[in-house]
Amino acid sequence: MRRTVVAALDEAAADIGRVDARVLACHLLGVDRAWLAANPMHVLTESQDARLDLLVAQRVLGHPVAYLVGSREFYGRDFAVDPAVLIPRPETETLVEAALERLAPGQAALDLGTGSGAIAVSLACERPGAAVTAVDASAAALSLARANAGRLGAPVEFAEGHWYGPVAGRRFDLVVANPPYVAAGDRHLAEGDLRFEPAAALTDGSVDGLGAIREIVAGAPGHLKSGGWLLIEHGYDQAGACRDLLAAAGFVELLARADLAGIPRVAGGRRP
Ligand SMILES: C[S@@+](CC[C@H](N)C(=O)[O-])C[C@H]1O[C@@H](n2cnc3c(N)ncnc32)[C@H](O)[C@@H]1O
């Protein structure tokens, strides 16, 4: 017998909790939460019924909700996501805020390791007139980032390659990066959503997780204009190491910013 919305939701909620059950049902039916609440006796079609069961089964196995519904909200916009890209995190909005405070229209910004394009597209949308370039080593990630930029009307220049490789010889007013910073072997890599995200987005394989950050800091003076800013997202316990790297590379006006949970999250500095 085909189920009503309320019966299907109750069953799903028993396996994956009410919040995820509602999100998956809304995605499947193409409705919002208000519609679900207002139509509890709506009867699912056979195909909807079966597809909901499949989504719930995948969620039970741990597949991230964002991959199951194909999108995640970031800085007020919906970004398409798939297993080729990191799911944008709320803490990365702290990096975007710090970047927007330092990016004027007409200036040039570089986003290293753009993934879904969340940071680059947010900067381009929030600061019309800024020239935003985004680099990633993953062709699959870039293809999704390009699609996100196109759908959201963000004029971002994308390039494939290793960190500064594709922008050799160019200088920017601002360089931002949310690089892989989880230490190789960190137990979190085997937990939760991280099990399903691209390994290269999470860890560079270094024992302290700082390999990519070291490379990005070292290359920054050669790709920043005088007075330009470098801003990097880092792990909860990497603020001191990032500050030391920035100071050793000659950066001044060193900045440290915590995310909304109060965890140190962004390190930055200015090229003299
Ligand atoms: C932590 S994810 C960040 C994604 C996105 N910027 C965000 O904040 O949601 C790191 C990204 O860096 C990219 N990446 C890893 N190593 C790279 C390298 N050597 N050069 C360029 N990009 C790299 C990965 O493909 C991944 O998309």
Image: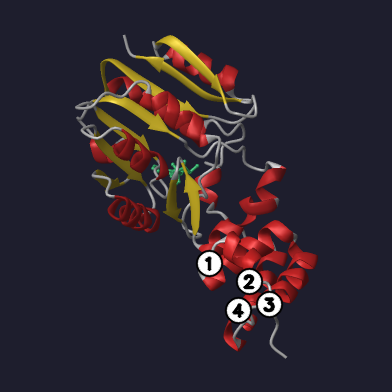
Label 1: which residue?
Answer: 31
Residue 61 left/right relative to 159: right
Q: Residue at x 50, y 52 (%)?
A: 72
First along the sequence among labels 4 and 1: 1
Q: Quadrant of ligand 1?
A: top left
Query: Which mark lies nearer to you, 3 or 4?
Result: 3
Residue type at tag 1: Val
Could you tell me residue 132's position as x and y percent? 27, 36
Under circle 4, the secondary element is: helix
Three-letter amino acid code of the residue under disc 2:
Asn
In the picture of the structure, the residue carrying the numbered disc 4 is: 51
Give how far apart the Cα atoms at labels 1 and 3 are.
15 Å
Question: Which marked residue is nearer to the observer: mark 4 or mark 1?
Answer: 1
Q: Residues within 10 Å of mark 4 (few under 14, many from 20)?
A: some
**Quadrant of the rendered structure where residue 229 is?**
top left
Circle 2 residue? 39
**Tags 1 and 2 in contact by the CB under 8 Å rule?**
yes
Q: Residue at x 54, y 61 (%)?
A: 67
Q: CA distance from mark 1 to mark 2?
A: 11 Å
Q: Give the label, 2 or 4, closer to the camera.
A: 2
Of callouts 1 and 2, the N-terminal one: 1
Which secondary structure, mark 3? loop
- Determine the secondary structure under disc 2: loop
Q: Can residue 150 be seen in the rendering of this structure?
A: yes
Where's residue 111, x and y in %? 35, 36
In terms of sequence position, does the residue under pointer 1 or pointer 3 come before the other?
Answer: 1
Task: Indicate the amino acid at tag 4.
Answer: Arg
Helix, strand or loop at mark 1: loop
